[in-house]
Image (cartoon, grey):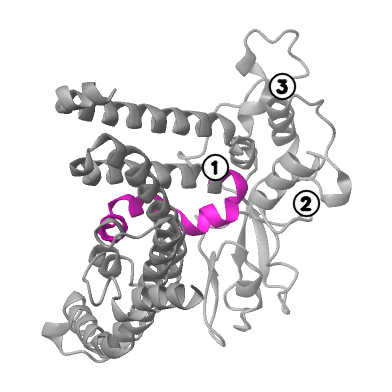
Amino acid sequence: MIDFIIQYPLLAAIAALVSLGAVFGALLGFAAVRFKTEGNPIVDQINDILPQTQCGQCGHPGCRPYAEAIANDNEPINKCPPGGEAGIQALADLLDLEPIPLDEEHGEEKVKAVAYIREDECIGCTKCIQACPVDAILGAAKHMHTVITSECTGCDLCVEPCPVDCIDMIPEQTTLQNWHWQLPDPVSREVEIIATDAPRNRAA
Amino acid sequence: MLADYSILLIGAILVNNFVLVQFLGLCPFMGVSNKLETAMGMSMATTFVLTLASACSNLTYHLLLVPLGLEYLKTISFILVIAVVVQFTEMVVRKSSPLLHRVLGVYLPLITTNCAVLGVALLNINKDHGFMQSLFYGFGAAVGFSLVLVLFAAMRERLAVADVPEPFKGPAIGMVTAGLMSLAFMGFAGLV
Protein backbone atom coordinates (compact mmCIF):
# COMPACT_ATOMS: atom_id res chain seq x y z
CA MET A 1 0.00 0.00 0.00
CA ILE A 2 2.67 2.48 1.12
CA ASP A 3 4.89 1.41 -1.77
CA PHE A 4 2.06 1.95 -4.20
CA ILE A 5 1.46 5.47 -2.92
CA ILE A 6 5.16 6.34 -3.13
CA GLN A 7 5.47 4.87 -6.59
CA TYR A 8 2.32 6.28 -8.15
CA PRO A 9 1.23 9.37 -6.18
CA LEU A 10 -1.07 10.46 -9.01
CA LEU A 11 -2.86 7.13 -9.14
CA ALA A 12 -3.20 7.18 -5.36
CA ALA A 13 -4.78 10.62 -5.53
CA ILE A 14 -7.23 9.53 -8.20
CA ALA A 15 -8.06 6.37 -6.28
CA ALA A 16 -8.62 8.37 -3.10
CA LEU A 17 -10.96 10.84 -4.79
CA VAL A 18 -12.85 8.10 -6.63
CA SER A 19 -13.32 6.09 -3.47
CA LEU A 20 -14.38 9.21 -1.56
CA GLY A 21 -16.92 9.91 -4.27
CA ALA A 22 -18.09 6.30 -4.29
CA VAL A 23 -18.54 6.24 -0.51
CA PHE A 24 -20.46 9.52 -0.54
CA GLY A 25 -22.53 8.40 -3.51
CA ALA A 26 -23.43 5.21 -1.70
CA LEU A 27 -24.30 7.21 1.41
CA LEU A 28 -26.59 9.52 -0.54
CA GLY A 29 -28.12 6.59 -2.38
CA PHE A 30 -28.80 4.86 0.91
CA ALA A 31 -30.25 8.07 2.35
CA ALA A 32 -32.48 8.53 -0.69
CA VAL A 33 -33.99 5.11 -0.06
CA ARG A 34 -33.99 5.26 3.72
CA PHE A 35 -35.47 8.75 4.01
CA LYS A 36 -37.79 8.47 1.06
CA THR A 37 -40.74 10.81 1.39
CA GLU A 38 -44.05 9.77 0.02
CA GLY A 39 -44.67 13.45 -0.49
CA ASN A 40 -48.39 13.68 -0.42
CA PRO A 41 -49.37 13.94 -4.04
CA ILE A 42 -52.80 12.51 -3.17
CA VAL A 43 -53.70 15.73 -1.36
CA ASP A 44 -52.90 17.72 -4.49
CA GLN A 45 -54.95 15.39 -6.66
CA ILE A 46 -57.94 15.63 -4.33
CA ASN A 47 -57.51 19.38 -4.19
CA ASP A 48 -57.57 19.52 -7.99
CA ILE A 49 -60.94 17.78 -8.08
CA LEU A 50 -62.52 19.99 -5.42
CA PRO A 51 -64.21 23.03 -6.98
CA GLN A 52 -62.06 25.65 -5.17
CA THR A 53 -65.03 27.71 -4.09
CA GLN A 54 -63.45 27.97 -0.62
CA CYS A 55 -67.02 28.11 0.69
CA GLY A 56 -66.46 26.14 3.88
CA GLN A 57 -69.74 24.23 3.59
CA CYS A 58 -67.84 21.01 4.29
CA GLY A 59 -66.90 22.36 7.73
CA HIS A 60 -63.27 22.95 6.79
CA PRO A 61 -61.80 26.42 6.27
CA GLY A 62 -61.22 25.84 2.56
CA CYS A 63 -60.82 23.29 -0.19
CA ARG A 64 -57.23 22.33 0.57
CA PRO A 65 -57.85 21.65 4.29
CA TYR A 66 -60.77 19.45 3.24
CA ALA A 67 -58.49 17.65 0.75
CA GLU A 68 -55.97 17.08 3.56
CA ALA A 69 -58.72 15.80 5.85
CA ILE A 70 -59.91 13.36 3.17
CA ALA A 71 -56.38 12.12 2.59
CA ASN A 72 -55.20 11.89 6.20
CA ASP A 73 -58.25 11.57 8.46
CA ASN A 74 -60.60 9.48 6.30
CA GLU A 75 -63.10 12.30 6.08
CA PRO A 76 -66.17 11.28 4.01
CA ILE A 77 -66.03 12.49 0.42
CA ASN A 78 -69.67 13.59 0.28
CA LYS A 79 -69.40 16.92 2.07
CA CYS A 80 -68.87 19.19 -0.92
CA PRO A 81 -72.14 20.59 -2.31
CA PRO A 82 -70.55 22.81 -4.98
CA GLY A 83 -68.70 19.81 -6.39
CA GLY A 84 -71.95 17.87 -6.46
CA GLU A 85 -72.43 14.27 -7.51
CA ALA A 86 -69.86 14.62 -10.29
CA GLY A 87 -67.22 15.71 -7.76
CA ILE A 88 -68.06 12.80 -5.47
CA GLN A 89 -67.83 10.41 -8.42
CA ALA A 90 -64.42 11.79 -9.38
CA LEU A 91 -63.18 11.53 -5.79
CA ALA A 92 -64.50 7.98 -5.52
CA ASP A 93 -62.67 7.02 -8.71
CA LEU A 94 -59.45 8.61 -7.50
CA LEU A 95 -59.55 7.06 -4.03
CA ASP A 96 -61.06 3.75 -5.14
CA LEU A 97 -64.10 4.19 -2.89
CA GLU A 98 -67.79 3.60 -3.44
CA PRO A 99 -69.54 6.81 -4.51
CA ILE A 100 -71.94 7.90 -1.78
CA PRO A 101 -74.79 10.40 -2.06
CA LEU A 102 -74.17 14.01 -1.06
CA ASP A 103 -74.51 14.66 2.65
CA GLU A 104 -77.59 16.92 2.85
CA GLU A 105 -76.38 18.29 6.17
CA HIS A 106 -73.72 20.30 4.38
CA GLY A 107 -76.07 21.80 1.78
CA GLU A 108 -77.40 20.73 -1.56
CA GLU A 109 -76.03 20.92 -5.04
CA LYS A 110 -77.00 24.08 -6.87
CA VAL A 111 -76.48 25.41 -10.32
CA LYS A 112 -73.26 27.39 -10.41
CA ALA A 113 -74.12 30.98 -9.70
CA VAL A 114 -72.34 34.26 -9.20
CA ALA A 115 -73.19 36.89 -6.62
CA TYR A 116 -74.71 40.16 -7.82
CA ILE A 117 -75.02 43.24 -5.64
CA ARG A 118 -78.01 45.48 -6.34
CA GLU A 119 -75.85 48.52 -6.30
CA ASP A 120 -78.40 51.23 -5.53
CA GLU A 121 -79.46 49.37 -2.39
CA CYS A 122 -75.90 48.77 -1.11
CA ILE A 123 -75.12 50.86 1.98
CA GLY A 124 -71.38 50.22 1.90
CA CYS A 125 -71.08 48.28 5.16
CA THR A 126 -68.12 46.10 3.93
CA LYS A 127 -69.59 43.03 5.67
CA CYS A 128 -69.75 41.04 2.45
CA ILE A 129 -66.14 41.96 1.65
CA GLN A 130 -65.02 40.42 4.91
CA ALA A 131 -67.07 37.31 4.25
CA CYS A 132 -65.74 36.70 0.73
CA PRO A 133 -63.13 33.91 0.80
CA VAL A 134 -61.65 34.78 -2.59
CA ASP A 135 -61.64 38.61 -2.41
CA ALA A 136 -64.04 38.91 -5.31
CA ILE A 137 -65.92 41.90 -3.85
CA LEU A 138 -64.64 45.41 -4.41
CA GLY A 139 -65.67 48.46 -2.45
CA ALA A 140 -64.90 50.71 0.50
CA ALA A 141 -66.75 51.75 3.65
CA LYS A 142 -69.84 53.88 2.87
CA HIS A 143 -69.29 53.32 -0.84
CA MET A 144 -71.12 50.98 -3.11
CA HIS A 145 -69.65 47.49 -3.49
CA THR A 146 -69.58 45.31 -6.52
CA VAL A 147 -68.61 41.76 -7.42
CA ILE A 148 -65.84 40.79 -9.82
CA THR A 149 -67.79 38.19 -11.74
CA SER A 150 -64.80 36.30 -13.02
CA GLU A 151 -63.43 35.84 -9.49
CA CYS A 152 -66.70 34.89 -7.79
CA THR A 153 -66.95 31.19 -6.98
CA GLY A 154 -70.64 31.29 -6.09
CA CYS A 155 -70.14 30.15 -2.50
CA ASP A 156 -73.11 32.08 -0.99
CA LEU A 157 -71.04 33.25 1.99
CA CYS A 158 -71.71 36.93 1.27
CA VAL A 159 -75.51 36.59 1.15
CA GLU A 160 -75.95 35.92 4.86
CA PRO A 161 -74.02 38.90 6.33
CA CYS A 162 -75.66 41.55 4.11
CA PRO A 163 -77.85 43.70 6.40
CA VAL A 164 -80.04 45.03 3.58
CA ASP A 165 -80.30 41.77 1.59
CA CYS A 166 -79.11 43.34 -1.61
CA ILE A 167 -77.06 40.37 -2.84
CA ASP A 168 -78.62 37.97 -5.33
CA MET A 169 -77.16 34.72 -6.54
CA ILE A 170 -77.65 34.74 -10.29
CA PRO A 171 -77.18 31.46 -12.16
CA GLU A 172 -74.20 31.65 -14.43
CA GLN A 173 -75.02 32.91 -17.92
CA THR A 174 -74.15 30.57 -20.73
CA THR A 175 -71.56 32.22 -22.89
CA LEU A 176 -69.40 31.02 -25.72
CA GLN A 177 -66.60 30.49 -23.23
CA ASN A 178 -68.39 28.14 -20.87
CA TRP A 179 -70.95 26.42 -23.07
CA HIS A 180 -70.35 22.77 -23.79
CA TRP A 181 -72.30 19.87 -25.17
CA GLN A 182 -74.74 18.42 -22.73
CA LEU A 183 -73.55 14.92 -21.91
CA PRO A 184 -76.07 12.15 -22.35
CA ASP A 185 -77.90 11.28 -19.17
CA PRO A 186 -75.80 8.58 -17.49
CA VAL A 187 -78.90 6.67 -16.30
CA SER A 188 -80.39 6.22 -19.76
CA ARG A 189 -77.14 4.95 -21.16
CA GLU A 190 -76.88 1.20 -21.13
CA VAL A 191 -73.13 0.67 -21.26
CA GLU A 192 -70.12 2.81 -20.75
CA ILE A 193 -68.04 2.32 -23.82
CA ILE A 194 -64.87 3.94 -22.61
CA ALA A 195 -63.80 5.08 -19.18
CA THR A 196 -64.24 8.76 -19.98
CA ASP A 197 -67.95 8.22 -20.62
CA ALA A 198 -68.44 8.38 -16.88
CA PRO A 199 -70.10 11.62 -15.79
CA ARG A 200 -66.94 12.73 -14.01
CA ASN A 201 -65.89 15.06 -16.82
CA ARG A 202 -68.84 17.24 -15.99
CA ALA A 203 -66.88 18.30 -12.91
CA ALA A 204 -64.60 20.47 -14.98
CA MET B 1 -10.63 23.45 28.69
CA LEU B 2 -14.02 25.14 28.89
CA ALA B 3 -12.32 28.52 28.68
CA ASP B 4 -10.54 27.43 25.49
CA TYR B 5 -13.78 26.48 23.80
CA SER B 6 -15.58 29.65 24.88
CA ILE B 7 -12.69 31.75 23.59
CA LEU B 8 -12.89 29.84 20.31
CA LEU B 9 -16.64 30.47 20.15
CA ILE B 10 -16.50 34.17 21.02
CA GLY B 11 -13.59 34.58 18.64
CA ALA B 12 -15.51 33.07 15.75
CA ILE B 13 -18.79 34.85 16.54
CA LEU B 14 -17.58 38.39 17.23
CA VAL B 15 -13.87 39.02 16.88
CA ASN B 16 -13.19 37.17 13.65
CA ASN B 17 -16.74 37.29 12.38
CA PHE B 18 -16.75 35.47 9.08
CA VAL B 19 -18.90 37.94 7.22
CA LEU B 20 -17.92 41.33 8.54
CA VAL B 21 -14.27 40.79 9.48
CA GLN B 22 -13.08 38.02 7.17
CA PHE B 23 -15.51 38.90 4.35
CA LEU B 24 -16.55 35.32 3.62
CA GLY B 25 -20.08 34.35 2.66
CA LEU B 26 -20.96 37.78 1.36
CA CYS B 27 -23.27 36.44 -1.37
CA PRO B 28 -25.98 35.11 0.95
CA PHE B 29 -25.30 38.08 3.25
CA MET B 30 -26.36 40.49 0.51
CA GLY B 31 -28.66 38.11 -1.32
CA VAL B 32 -31.12 36.85 1.28
CA SER B 33 -31.14 39.79 3.67
CA ASN B 34 -34.07 41.61 2.08
CA LYS B 35 -36.59 40.04 4.43
CA LEU B 36 -36.12 39.12 8.07
CA GLU B 37 -38.08 35.91 7.65
CA THR B 38 -35.93 34.51 4.85
CA ALA B 39 -32.82 35.61 6.71
CA MET B 40 -33.94 33.53 9.71
CA GLY B 41 -34.49 30.50 7.49
CA MET B 42 -31.08 30.91 5.90
CA SER B 43 -29.45 31.33 9.32
CA MET B 44 -30.93 28.14 10.68
CA ALA B 45 -29.96 26.13 7.62
CA THR B 46 -26.44 27.54 7.60
CA THR B 47 -25.89 26.93 11.30
CA PHE B 48 -26.80 23.31 10.92
CA VAL B 49 -24.77 22.64 7.79
CA LEU B 50 -21.72 24.67 8.78
CA THR B 51 -21.31 22.85 12.10
CA LEU B 52 -21.71 19.45 10.51
CA ALA B 53 -19.54 20.19 7.47
CA SER B 54 -16.77 21.60 9.65
CA ALA B 55 -16.62 18.39 11.69
CA CYS B 56 -16.94 16.07 8.69
CA SER B 57 -14.25 17.78 6.64
CA ASN B 58 -11.95 17.63 9.64
CA LEU B 59 -12.51 13.87 9.84
CA THR B 60 -11.93 13.45 6.10
CA TYR B 61 -8.68 15.37 6.28
CA HIS B 62 -7.23 13.55 9.23
CA LEU B 63 -8.49 10.06 8.46
CA LEU B 64 -8.09 9.98 4.69
CA LEU B 65 -5.92 12.71 3.23
CA VAL B 66 -3.12 12.88 5.82
CA PRO B 67 -2.45 9.09 5.93
CA LEU B 68 -2.24 9.00 2.14
CA GLY B 69 -0.10 12.13 1.96
CA LEU B 70 -2.68 13.88 -0.22
CA GLU B 71 -3.02 17.14 1.70
CA TYR B 72 -3.05 19.08 -1.56
CA LEU B 73 -6.44 17.55 -2.39
CA LYS B 74 -8.10 19.19 0.59
CA THR B 75 -10.04 21.86 -1.31
CA ILE B 76 -11.71 19.50 -3.75
CA SER B 77 -12.40 16.88 -1.06
CA PHE B 78 -13.96 19.50 1.21
CA ILE B 79 -16.23 20.70 -1.59
CA LEU B 80 -17.32 17.10 -2.03
CA VAL B 81 -17.91 16.69 1.70
CA ILE B 82 -19.91 19.91 1.91
CA ALA B 83 -22.09 18.99 -1.06
CA VAL B 84 -22.83 15.59 0.45
CA VAL B 85 -23.56 17.00 3.89
CA VAL B 86 -25.98 19.51 2.38
CA GLN B 87 -27.77 16.88 0.32
CA PHE B 88 -27.93 14.44 3.20
CA THR B 89 -29.25 17.14 5.54
CA GLU B 90 -31.91 18.07 3.05
CA MET B 91 -33.14 14.48 2.78
CA VAL B 92 -33.19 13.97 6.54
CA VAL B 93 -34.96 17.27 7.18
CA ARG B 94 -37.54 16.59 4.48
CA LYS B 95 -38.30 13.25 6.05
CA SER B 96 -38.20 14.17 9.72
CA SER B 97 -39.65 17.67 9.73
CA PRO B 98 -41.66 18.78 6.70
CA LEU B 99 -42.40 22.05 8.48
CA LEU B 100 -38.72 22.91 8.91
CA HIS B 101 -38.14 21.83 5.33
CA ARG B 102 -40.76 24.29 4.18
CA VAL B 103 -39.15 27.07 6.25
CA LEU B 104 -35.62 26.35 5.01
CA GLY B 105 -36.92 25.66 1.52
CA VAL B 106 -34.55 26.66 -1.23
CA TYR B 107 -31.89 27.96 1.16
CA LEU B 108 -30.67 24.54 2.15
CA PRO B 109 -29.24 23.56 -1.28
CA LEU B 110 -27.91 27.10 -1.71
CA ILE B 111 -25.52 26.63 1.19
CA THR B 112 -23.36 24.37 -0.97
CA THR B 113 -22.01 27.47 -2.65
CA ASN B 114 -21.56 29.47 0.54
CA CYS B 115 -17.84 30.19 0.69
CA ALA B 116 -17.94 30.59 4.47
CA VAL B 117 -18.54 26.84 4.74
CA LEU B 118 -15.47 26.01 2.70
CA GLY B 119 -13.58 28.80 4.44
CA VAL B 120 -14.23 27.33 7.89
CA ALA B 121 -13.15 23.88 6.73
CA LEU B 122 -9.88 25.21 5.32
CA LEU B 123 -9.19 27.48 8.31
CA ASN B 124 -9.65 24.51 10.61
CA ILE B 125 -6.74 22.85 8.83
CA ASN B 126 -4.62 25.99 8.82
CA LYS B 127 -5.14 26.46 12.55
CA ASP B 128 -4.53 22.77 13.38
CA HIS B 129 -7.89 22.35 15.06
CA GLY B 130 -8.81 18.96 16.49
CA PHE B 131 -12.23 17.38 16.00
CA MET B 132 -13.98 19.08 18.92
CA GLN B 133 -12.30 22.38 18.15
CA SER B 134 -13.46 22.14 14.56
CA LEU B 135 -16.98 21.46 15.73
CA PHE B 136 -16.98 24.51 18.01
CA TYR B 137 -15.24 26.72 15.47
CA GLY B 138 -17.81 25.76 12.82
CA PHE B 139 -20.66 26.38 15.22
CA GLY B 140 -19.22 29.74 16.26
CA ALA B 141 -18.76 30.78 12.65
CA ALA B 142 -22.37 29.81 11.92
CA VAL B 143 -23.71 31.71 14.91
CA GLY B 144 -21.69 34.75 13.85
CA PHE B 145 -23.04 34.47 10.32
CA SER B 146 -26.61 34.15 11.62
CA LEU B 147 -26.17 37.07 13.96
CA VAL B 148 -25.02 39.54 11.33
CA LEU B 149 -27.42 38.21 8.70
CA VAL B 150 -30.44 38.70 10.98
CA LEU B 151 -29.20 42.12 12.15
CA PHE B 152 -28.56 43.21 8.58
CA ALA B 153 -31.94 41.94 7.36
CA ALA B 154 -33.69 43.87 10.14
CA MET B 155 -31.85 47.01 9.09
CA ARG B 156 -32.59 46.53 5.40
CA GLU B 157 -36.29 46.13 6.15
CA ARG B 158 -36.20 49.57 7.72
CA LEU B 159 -34.02 50.97 4.93
CA ALA B 160 -36.57 49.83 2.37
CA VAL B 161 -39.08 52.35 3.70
CA ALA B 162 -36.58 55.04 4.71
CA ASP B 163 -36.12 58.26 2.78
CA VAL B 164 -32.86 57.34 1.01
CA PRO B 165 -31.43 59.71 -1.65
CA GLU B 166 -32.16 58.42 -5.13
CA PRO B 167 -28.60 57.35 -6.15
CA PHE B 168 -28.17 55.35 -2.93
CA LYS B 169 -31.40 53.37 -3.14
CA GLY B 170 -31.36 49.56 -3.07
CA PRO B 171 -28.09 47.63 -2.99
CA ALA B 172 -25.96 50.79 -2.73
CA ILE B 173 -27.25 51.75 0.70
CA GLY B 174 -27.04 48.05 1.61
CA MET B 175 -23.32 48.05 0.85
CA VAL B 176 -22.81 51.24 2.86
CA THR B 177 -24.70 49.73 5.77
CA ALA B 178 -22.65 46.55 5.58
CA GLY B 179 -19.48 48.63 5.62
CA LEU B 180 -20.60 50.50 8.72
CA MET B 181 -21.53 47.21 10.40
CA SER B 182 -18.11 45.89 9.51
CA LEU B 183 -16.49 48.95 11.14
CA ALA B 184 -18.55 48.31 14.26
CA PHE B 185 -17.48 44.66 14.37
CA MET B 186 -13.80 45.68 14.02
CA GLY B 187 -14.31 47.20 17.44
CA PHE B 188 -14.45 43.71 18.94
CA ALA B 189 -10.81 43.18 17.90
CA GLY B 190 -9.39 43.62 21.39
CA LEU B 191 -11.93 41.38 23.10
CA VAL B 192 -10.06 38.07 23.08
Give the magenta-colored segment's residue range: B94-123
**Residue at 22% over, 21% down:** A4
Query: Residue beneath label 1, please?
Result: A174
Looking at the rendered structure, the kind of residue marked 2 is Cys
From the top left corner, tell me how far across and down residue A53 is, in percent.
Answer: 63, 52
Looking at the rendered structure, the kind of residue marked 3 is Asp
Q: Dot 3: what SS? A: loop
Q: Do pointers 3 and 2 mark residues of a single chain?
A: yes
Whole-Å distance between the Cαs marked 3 and 1? 20 Å
Q: Residues within 10 Å of mark 2 (few under 14, many from 20)?
A: many
Looking at the rendered structure, the kind of residue marked 1 is Thr
Is A199 situated above or below B132?
above
From the top left corner, tell me how far across and down residue B161 is, in percent.
Answer: 32, 86
Whether B54 is among the magenta residues is no
Whether B120 is among the magenta residues is yes
- Mark positioned earlier in the residue sequence (3 or 2): 2
Q: Kindly report which numbered mark, 1 or 2, lies closer to the viewer in this rendering.
A: 2
Q: Main secondary structure of the magenta part?
A: helix
